[in-house]
C-alpha cells in the first residue's frame, strides 16, 4: 500500500491485524497535501520505482484535493485507491461527514496527525509564522475547528484545542477511531490476502 504519510500510524495499526500481515505500507510525505497538484507525480514516480516488486499495489490516498487526477492515475496503472474525497471523510464516515459539512460549511477539520504536526504543516507550512496577516486570508471564512480524534489522547486534544484558538475558531471534538478507513483497508487489502 503506497499511502499518504498523514495516515502512516493508522495504516500500520490497521494492517497489523491478523489476516493483513501480507500488506506492506510505504508512505509519501504528508507535506504533499499543501500542494495537492504534486501528489499524482510523486505517486507515479514511486509506482515506477517499485514496479514488479509487488503482486498488487493499493493507493492509500483518497482524492486529497487532486481533482480526479489520482483516479486517472489509478485507472491508467490498474490500481485502486481508498474511497472518498479525503481522510476526514474516511475517519468520520461518509454519512457523518456529509452531515457535518451540511451543518456548517465553514469547518476546518483536524485529524490526530494534523493536531500533532499543526505548527509544522499549517503554521510554518502556510507561512503564518512569518506572515500572521495571512491567517485571515486562509481561515477568515471558517467558524469552527473539529478534531476528528482517532485516539483517546488527552495531549492531542490539548493540541487540537490550541490549534482552534490559534486560528480563532470555535473548538469541537469528535471521537472517530479509524472509522471507514479501517473497513476500506480491510476490504481492499483483505481481498488480496494470500
Image (cartoon, grey):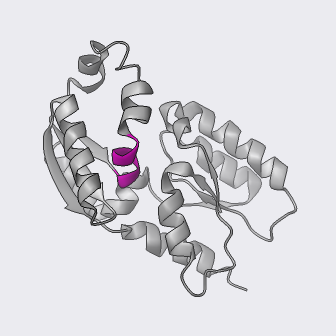
Left or right: residue 33 versus residue 91 is right
| Nearer the observer, 165 or 174 | 165
> Quick one: quadrant of the N terminus?
bottom right
Position of 86 relative to 138 (above/below): below
Left or right: residue 11 versus residue 189 is left
**Where are the magenta residues, as a range?**
111-117
Residue at the image position 54 percent from the left and 82 percent from the top = 17
Residue at the image position 27 percent from the left and 66 percent from the top = 152
Question: Visible in this render: residue 142?
Answer: no
Place of residue 145 in the rendered image (x, y in percent of width and height, measured from the top left): 21, 42
Position of 10 relative to 71 (above/below): below
Residue at the image position 36 percent from the left and 61 percent from the top = 91
Place of residue 136 in the rendered image (x, y in percent of width and height, measured from the top left): 23, 19
Question: Visible in this render: residue 155?
Answer: yes
Place of residue 16 in the rendered image (x, y in percent of width and height, measured from the top left): 56, 77
Place of residue 62 in the rendered image (x, y in percent of width and height, measured from the top left): 50, 53
**Residue 98 lies within the magenta run:** no
**Residue 112 lies within the magenta run:** yes
Position of 35 relative to 65 (above/below): above
Position of 172 relative to 182 (above/below): above
Left or right: residue 52 versus residue 113 is right
| Nearer the observer, 65 or 20 | 20
**Location of residue 25 (image quadrant):** bottom right
Taking the view exactly as shown, the residue that stands out farthest to the left is 170
> Quick one: quadrant of the C terminus?
bottom right
| Number of disc labels | 0
Left or right: residue 186 versus residue 114 is right
Taking the view exactly as shown, the residue that stands out farthest to the right is 52
Question: Chief secondary structure of the magenta span?
Answer: helix
Amino acid at each position: 500500500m503506497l499511502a499518504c504519510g498523514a495516515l502512516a500510524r493508522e495504516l500500520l495499526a490497521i494492517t497489523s491485524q491478523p489476516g493483513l500481515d501480507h500488506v506492506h505500507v510505504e508512505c509519501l510525505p504528508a507535506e504533499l497535501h499543501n500542494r495537492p497538484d504534486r501528489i499524482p507525480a510523486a505517486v507515479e514516480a514511486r509506482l515506477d520505482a517499485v514496479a514488479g516488486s509487488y503482486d498488487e499495489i493499493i493507493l492509500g490516498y483518497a482524492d486529497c484535493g487532486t481533482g480526479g487526477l489520482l483516479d486517472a492515475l489509478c485507472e491508467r496503472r490498474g490500481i485502486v485507491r481508498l474511497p472518498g474525497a479525503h481522510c476526514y471523510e474516511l475517519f468520520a464516515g461518509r454519512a457523518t461527514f456529509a452531515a457535518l459539512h451540511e451543518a456548517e460549511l465553514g469547518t476546518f477539520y483536524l485529524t490526530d496527525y494534523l493536531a500533532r504536526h499543526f505548527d509544522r504543516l499549517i503554521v510554518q507550512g502556510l507561512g503564518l509564522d512569518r506572515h500572521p496577516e495571512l491567517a485571515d486570508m486562509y481561515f477568515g471564512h471558517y467558524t469552527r475547528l473539529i478534531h476528528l480524534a482517532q485516539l483517546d489522547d488527552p495531549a492531542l486534544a490539548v493540541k487540537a484545542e490550541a490549534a482552534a484558538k490559534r486560528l480563532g475558531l470555535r473548538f469541537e471534538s469528535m471521537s472517530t477511531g479509524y472509522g471507514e478507513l479501517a473497513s476500506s483497508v480491510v476490504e481492499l487489502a483483505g481481498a488480496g490476502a494470500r
